[in-house]
Image (spheres, helix red, strand yellow):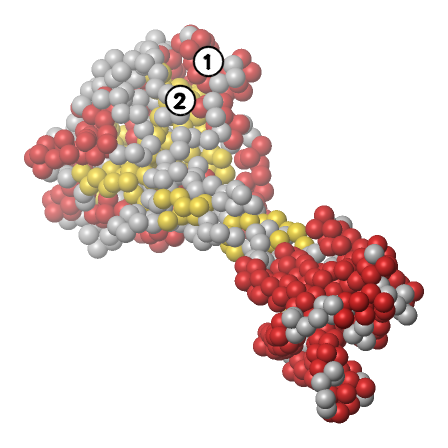
Amino acid sequence: MLKLCLLYLLLNIALLVTSVMHPRCFWRMKLSEDKDADLVTCYIFFLQLWQGIMDIDFFNKRLDLQKPTKNYRYALAFSFAIDEVNKNPDILPNISLAFGINADGCKTVFEIYKETQSSKYKYDRAPNYVCTQETVCSVMLSGPNWAVSAIIAQAMGLLTSQKVLLLTYGPFHPILSESEQFPYLYQMAPKDTSLALAMVSLILHFNWNWVGLAISDNDEGIQFLSYLRREMEKSILCFAFVNMIPVELHLYISRAEVYYKEIVTSSTNVVIIYGDTDSTLAVSFRMWESQGIQRIWVTTSQWDATTNKKDFTLGLQHGTIAFAHHHAEISGFKTFVQTLNPVKYSNEYLAKLEWMKFNCEASTSMCKTLKNCSSNASLEALMIETVDMAFGDESYGIYNAVYAVAHAFHELLLQTMDNWKVHIFNCSKMHSILRKTQFTNPSGDRVNMNKKENLEAEYNIFQILNFPQGLGFKVKIGKFSPYFLHGQQLHLYEDVLEWATGNRQMLPSVCSSDCGPGFRKFWQEGMSDCCFDCNPCPENEVSNETNVDQCTSCPEEQYANSEQNHCIDKVVIFLNYGDTLGMALVLMATCLSAFTFVILGVFVIHQDTPIVKANNRNLSYTLLISLVVCFLCPLLYIGHPNSASCILQQIVFGVAFTVAVSTVLAKTVTVVLAFKITNPGRRMRYYLVSGAPKYIIASCTIIQTILCAIWLGISPPSINTDAHSEHGHIIIMCDKGSVTAFYIVLGYHGTLALGTFIVAFLARNLPDTFNEAKLLTFSMLLFCTVWVAFLPVYHSTKGKFMVAVEVFSILASSAGLLGCIFIPKCYIILIRPERNSLKKLKEKASS
């Protein structure tokens, strides 16, 4: 466990160091003509031991036989590695590595075999083959084409009974790792099992989700597609298209137009290229670039050539993003090459073979972006800045292969010091040593030849851009390491990316534009997961992020704003004293109650006058006092509700109005009895004298009190909040509790009012001197009209307006009783006192 912790700490320290170091920049010139032969050229190298010193003439003699193609850099890298090994006193002391090169080895396998056989007798031809005994073990390096390596391994196995040790320096291929089929074959390149994860991490970093894919239709391409699809499905990324380019030429020719149209018509800006550079996929890629298709090509380092034939600068947002295996830099390569022949290996010549490093920091100080720098800088300025040549993946594989063979030879010599010239060609012995070989190369990287112990590859990420005059620029923009925690594996140099492309973000590549806050994604049937429509969030739901699948409902105490991107606290409302409506109702209630007190005072002052005595003045006092209570009752409805106010407002309303209406009923009965007493009969007089109408008030009030008690016992009124009736508001109001009980109390009022109205209506034609029958009839008509109109209006309003309707109905009905019954009497008392006399009463009666 402690070792794992230390390893994790060291890895994080390494990442921190790489983050502060300025990455390297490179430049390369393309050849005057893109030769198709470069796509299929391969190099085969032969290695053997030689007792002697390898001088410069030996290297020049071997290299001068080679054609100056772009793949000629492999021969230079091979020669450089041989020279380093021979100059190293700790490896093969007093013995040199000799070599042979066969650049035409891709012609036929039989010609390779013929040359290896002839080398037994002619040393200059292939110095590896010294015929000291019949069994000869050949050590060969082949590449970069894996298929050629496979053919060589199979053919040599058949012709020489597996007496060939073959090391390949091309890209890793799973077929070549099969030990049963290729037991004596070693691949120097690490496995690309993390390549799909690295590419998906880059896609996620730039917020792409819509990418195209072009691969070779073979086992390697299908396996990569499987890895890539698995990683993309984890992050909901989608393929805009998948072009599986046939390996067979005739099939490709018949479908080439289809592949071209698919990539041209696709809406994606990012295309992943994966396959061999000497396949029909490479032909397609060249055609796409030559046609000026502007895309961001995401691929591996094998595709980093500047092959664009158009001599103009593409948009800096386009270009190639290449993943190359991470390895330390090899110093001294350019110095060695120019030592061989300074005239031949000029900077311009070397720049056509391999990437040349230039001072990136100096360039950033001279110009803000790479575009300005490249358009103003000359080739001479770049060559002055050049410090060395950079090793590509294949060249680095050659470098490690030479060192691996040298270390294996060294170990074999230590084990067979007595007769090394005999044992040096024992392939079984050499194979057993080579597969266990582990060493650290001069650049500091660890090399392990055991196939089962190969670690996952780390990747450097480069941005490659093509500019006029055949210039190609490659800038290291980041690194990917599978050994870090998820989410920390990709590290991009944002400042370098901005300098290289002019922006920290690449071109977008999405099927559908992002659904911003306030919207949610909506998929239609048959659409890809990355293709969707944006629909607004439903009512009272919000989304404050992009590309959400579902909107979030706001809590009851909040509501969605108009943009529906966040919730706002609802405003708590009730019928407040500070509102205009509340102030108006309070003013009406206080004024009416005060006016009622004034009328009560008038009646008390003139209590001995006939008009006050008529119809029982005690009933008038009772009615006036009950009306005062009715006018003050609405004050319980206004203001912040509480439990006490909710209960009191219904009890006071029910009892006070029962007293008022029952008093009106008693007055009406009194009028009827007063006029009926003139007829013979003692029973009517008994009812009037005994004060029977007073018992009407008591009995009616008791019944209403019982109903209210039952209401409070079953389901009393309480505080309730309504968060849905009005948008953006929380209404605090008193809940009726039992709605049935509320309507029973209200219905009881209506029954009393209706009974009073009927009795008063029947007594309307009695003599009208001091007769209240007509006044009572009009008052009860108004009272009933108000409460009949109350029901539909009350149910059609919400919130505080519902309370206001109830308050207004209470005030209006009470004012109707006050105005219809008492105002005419006050008019006579105060304005026409001559009519308020017993004489006037007798005159009226006699008439």
The residue drawn where x is 27% and y is 25% is 293
Q: Is residue 669 visible?
A: no
Q: Earlier in the sequence, mark 2 or mark 1?
A: 2
Q: Split into 4 quadrants, where in the image is the N terminus?
A: bottom right
Q: Secondary structure at mark 1?
A: helix
Q: Secondary structure at mark 2?
A: loop
Q: Split into 4 quadrants, where in the image is the C terminus?
A: bottom right
Report, in whole angstroms, how far the alpha carbon at label 2 lies from the one at label 1: 11 Å
Q: To which residue does mark 1 refer? A: 372
Circle 1 Cα neighbour tier, 10 Å, few/some/many (<14 / 14–19 / ≥20): few
Q: Is residue 6 toward the left or the right of residue 214 in the image?
A: right
Foreground pick, 637 / 363: 637
Query: Could you tell me residue 54's position as x and y percent?
Result: 34, 24
Residue 316's disc is 2
Up the image or down, 482 lies above or below 308; here it is below
The residue drawn where x is 36% and y is 26% is 318
Up the image or down, 28 lies above or below 819; here it is above
Q: Is residue 805 visible?
A: yes
The residue drawn where x is 81% and y is 70% is 842
Circle 2 Cα neighbour tier, 10 Å, few/some/many (<14 / 14–19 / ≥20): many
Quadrant in the picture for residue 398: top left
Query: Could you tell me residue 72's position as x and y percent?
Result: 27, 23
Foreground pick, 161 / 844: 844
